[in-house]
Image: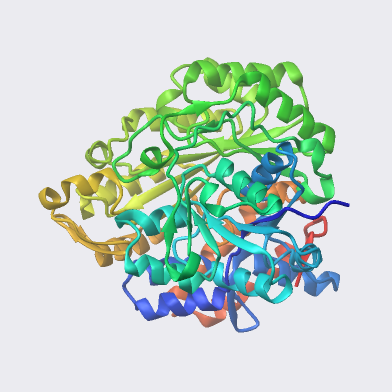
C-alpha cells in the first residue's frame, strides 16, 4: 500500500470543564457565564453538555459506555478535503471528532502520514489545536502538521504581527494556510512533500524556515463546486453514519451587518442541480437517511431552490433533509409545498430579532410579517422550526427585546435560542463603530443603546418569559442534533419532551430556590431517557 499522504482532522470540542472554568473566570453577569449556565446539565454532581448527560443517564440502564455526540455526523470539512485530495491522486483519510475517534486516529498516525491537516471551522481560539498537535508529535513526529481555516484567517486580521507569530508558536504546527477555501493549497503541500519539493512552491502558506515566519505567494482560490463535489463512494456507512452533511453553495447572498462571512468567502457560488443529484444518490445508496444542507441560504435564489426540491421529489430517494431557511425569500405557497414534498423535516431560521428597527439595523432585508407568515406556513406542513435570536445588537433596548419575546410567543416556533451579540471587528457594523459608540469586541462590549452585561441579563429574562417555544442548548448540541438523534431512533416529539424537561431543569437550577423540585425534574429526565429505543453510539466513553 502507498504511503498515507494526509490525515485530515475535523473537530476537537475541547473539555467542558475547561470551558466552564473559562466562563466562570469571566464572571457572573457576563455573556459567557450566562450562556454556560443555560446549556448544561449536571449528572453525578458534574456539569456536562446535554448529549453527555443523555449518554450517561442512558448507560445506567443499558450497561453500555455509549457516548452520543453530534460529531457522529461526519465533519464536512474533513470529508470534503479527503475527497478532494483523493481526486488529486493522493491517499488521504478523514477524522471527524478528535476525542471520539482517538483509536482510529492513532492507527492512522502509526502509518506515519506525510501531512496531518487540522481544520478550524468552529474554533474561536487556539486552545482546541494544541492537544491535536501534541498527539501527532508524540505518535508521528515526522508528519508535517498544517493548520488552515477560519481561525487562521481571523488571527491574521491585522497581518503577520509578532502576536500572531506567538500564536503560531503556541499551536505548534509546521505551517498555516491563509485562504478562505484552501483545498488547492493543501493539495499542493501534500504533492510537494511527497515529491521532496520546496515549500516555497505552495501557495498561501505561512511557514518558519530558519526561525523566521515567511509567507509564500498569495493566490486566491476559486474552486469549482461541481468538479470538487464529494465522491461518497469512497466512504463507508460505518464511517459516514445515517445522517450526512451536504454543501450545494459557497458563501452567502446577503450582507447582514453583524456577519463577515460573505466578505471572507467571496461571491455566492453554487453547484449544479445535477451535481447535488449525484451526491444525494450516492448517499442514499450508502444507506444515509437524513441530509443536512449546510448552505447559509439554501432557499436562495428561490428559482434554484424550487429546482432542487423538484429534483428531490423526482428522485424519491427516501431522504429527509434539514437546512438554513430564509422566510423572506419563500414568497409563495409553492416554495413551502415543494419543501415539504421533497422531504424537508426541519429548518434553522436565523431570525435574529422580533423588532423591525433592529432588523433594519442588521440589514436583514426581512420584515416581521414575512417571518410570521413563514413560520406559520412551515408549521402547517409539519416542518420543525428553530428560531435563533441575537440580543444586544446596536439599537437594542429593553423594549425591542420585549418585542422579540412577544414575537416568539405569538409565532411559537418549535425551538428557539437567544444569546448576546458577539461583536466581530471584521463585520460591516464596525465600519460605523464611532457613530454607534461601539467599544470592545467579542462578548465584552458597549454601544449607544446597551452593554454586553445588559444583553446577558435580558437573555436570562427571555428564558423565563418565552413560554410558547422550547429552549435549545448550544454546546455540542444545536439544531443539527435533531437529524443526528432522529438517525439514532429519537423522534422529534420524543426529543421535544426531553428538551421541555431540560428547560425546566435549567430554570429551576439557576433560580436556586427549589432543590427538591430540581431533584424531581432530574429523576423525570432520566426516566424519559430510559423509555427511549435508541441505536448504539459510534463513540464511547
Measured as percent of width and height from the top left, residue 370 is found at: 37, 28
Q: Quadrant of the C terminus?
A: bottom right
Q: Nearer the viewer, residue 33 or 118?
A: 118
Q: Can residue 269 be spotted in the picture?
A: yes
How many numbered marks have been drawn onto this rendered protein structure? Answer: 0
Residue 320 in the figure: left or right of residue 336: right
Question: Residue at coordinates 59% horizontally, 28% vertically from top-left?
Answer: 381
Q: Residue furthest bottom?
A: 45
Rendered location of residue 92, percent (x, y): 74, 50
* Identity of the residue drawn at 62% across and 69% down: 132
- Asked whether the viewer can see residue 342, the reply is no
Judge from the rendering whether residue 406 lies leftward or rightward of residue 529; answer left or right: left
Front in this rendered view, residue 341 or 316: 316
Vertical side of 366 occupied by 502: above or below: below
Front position in the image: 169 or 472: 169
Q: Position of residue 33 (x, y in %)?
A: 39, 72
Furthest residue toward right: 1
Which colouring convention does the figure follow?
Answer: rainbow
Residue 71 located left or right of residue 213: right
- Image location of residue 19, percent across then percent down: 49, 73
Above or below — where is 480 with respect to 42? above
The answer to whether 151 is drawn above or below residue 77 in the figure is below
- Measuring 66% from the left and 47% from the top, which residue is drawn there? 191
Residue 50 appears in which quarter of the rendering?
bottom right
Amino acid at each position: 500500500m502507498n504511503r498515507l499522504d494526509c490525515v485530515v482532522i475535523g473537530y476537537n470540542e475541547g473539555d467542558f470543564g475547561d470551558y466552564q472554568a473559562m466562563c466562570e473566570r469571566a464572571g457572573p453577569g457576563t455573556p459567557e457565564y450566562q450562556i454556560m449556565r443555560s446549556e448544561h446539565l449536571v449528572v453525578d454532581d458534574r456539569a456536562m453538555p446535554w448529549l453527555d448527560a443523555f449518554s450517561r443517564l442512558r448507560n445506567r440502564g443499558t450497561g453500555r459506555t455509549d457516548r452520543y455526540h453530534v460529531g457522529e455526523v461526519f465533519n464536512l470539512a474533513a470529508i470534503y478535503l479527503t475527497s478532494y485530495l483523493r481526486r488529486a491522486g493522493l491517499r488521504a483519510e478523514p477524522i471527524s471528532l478528535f476525542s471520539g475517534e482517538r483509536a482510529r486516529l492513532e492507527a492512522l498516525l502509526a502509518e506515519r502520514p506525510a501531512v496531518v491537516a487540522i481544520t478550524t471551522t468552529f474554533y474561536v481560539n487556539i486552545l482546541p489545536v494544541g492537544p491535536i498537535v501534541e498527539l501527532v508529535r508524540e505518535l508521528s513526529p515526522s508528519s508535517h502538521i498544517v493548520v488552515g481555516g477560519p481561525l487562521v484567517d481571523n488571527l491574521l486580521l491585522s497581518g503577520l504581527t509578532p502576536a500572531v507569530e506567538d500564536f503560531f508558536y503556541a499551536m505548534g504546527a509546521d505551517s498555516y494556510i491563509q485562504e478562505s477555501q484552501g483545498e488547492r493549497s493543501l493539495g499542493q503541500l501534500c504533492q510537494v512533500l511527497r515529491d521532496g519539493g520546496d515549500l516555497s512552491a505552495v501557495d498561501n502558506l505561512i511557514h518558519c524556515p530558519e526561525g523566521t515566519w515567511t509567507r509564500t505567494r498569495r493566490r486566491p482560490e476559486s474552486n469549482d463546486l461541481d468538479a470538487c463535489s464529494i465522491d461518497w463512494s469512497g466512504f463507508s456507512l460505518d464511517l459516514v453514519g445515517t445522517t450526512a452533511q451536504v454543501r450545494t453553495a459557497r458563501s452567502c447572498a446577503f450582507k447582514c451587518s453583524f456577519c463577515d462571512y460573505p466578505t471572507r468567502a467571496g461571491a455566492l457560488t453554487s453547484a449544479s442541480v445535477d451535481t447535488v443529484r449525484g451526491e444525494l444518490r450516492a448517499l442514499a445508496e450508502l444507506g444515509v437517511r437524513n441530509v443536512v444542507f449546510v448552505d447559509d441560504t439554501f432557499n436562495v435564489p428561490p428559482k434554484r431552490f424550487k429546482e432542487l426540491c423538484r429534483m428531490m421529489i423526482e428522485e424519491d430517494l427516501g431522504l429527509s433533509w434539514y437546512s438554513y431557511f430564509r422566510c423572506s425569500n419563500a414568497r409563495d405557497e409553492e416554495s413551502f409545498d415543494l419543501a415539504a414534498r421533497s422531504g424537508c423535516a426541519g429548518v434553522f431560521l436565523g431570525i435574529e430579532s422580533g423588532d423591525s428597527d433592529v432588523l433594519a439595523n442588521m440589514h436583514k432585508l426581512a420584515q416581521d410579517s414575512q417571518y410570521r407568515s413563514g413560520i406559520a406556513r412551515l408549521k402547517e406542513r409539519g416542518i420543525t422550526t428553530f428560531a435563533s435570536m441575537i440580543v444586544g445588537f446596536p439599537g437594542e433596548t429593553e423594549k425591542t427585546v420585549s418585542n422579540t419575546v412577544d414575537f416568539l410567543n405569538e409565532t411559537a416556533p418549535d425551538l428557539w435560542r437567544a444569546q448576546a451579540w458577539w461583536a466581530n471587528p471584521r463585520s460591516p457594523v464596525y465600519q460605523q463603530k464611532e457613530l454607534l459608540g461601539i467599544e470592545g469586541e467579542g462578548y465584552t462590549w458597549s454601544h449607544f443603546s446597551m452593554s454586553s452585561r445588559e444583553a446577558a441579563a435580558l437573555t436570562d429574562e427571555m428564558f423565563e418569559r418565552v413560554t410558547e417555544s422550547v429552549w435549545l442548548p448550544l454546546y455540542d448540541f444545536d439544531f443539527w442534533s435533531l437529524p443526528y438523534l432522529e438517525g439514532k431512533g429519537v423522534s422529534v416529539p420524543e426529543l421535544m419532551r426531553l428538551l421541555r424537561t431540560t428547560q425546566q431543569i435549567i430554570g429551576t437550577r439557576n433560580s436556586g430556590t427549589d432543590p427538591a423540585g430540581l431533584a424531581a425534574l432530574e429523576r423525570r429526565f432520566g426516566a424519559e431517557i430510559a423509555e427511549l429505543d435508541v441505536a448504539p453510539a459510534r463513540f464511547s466513553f
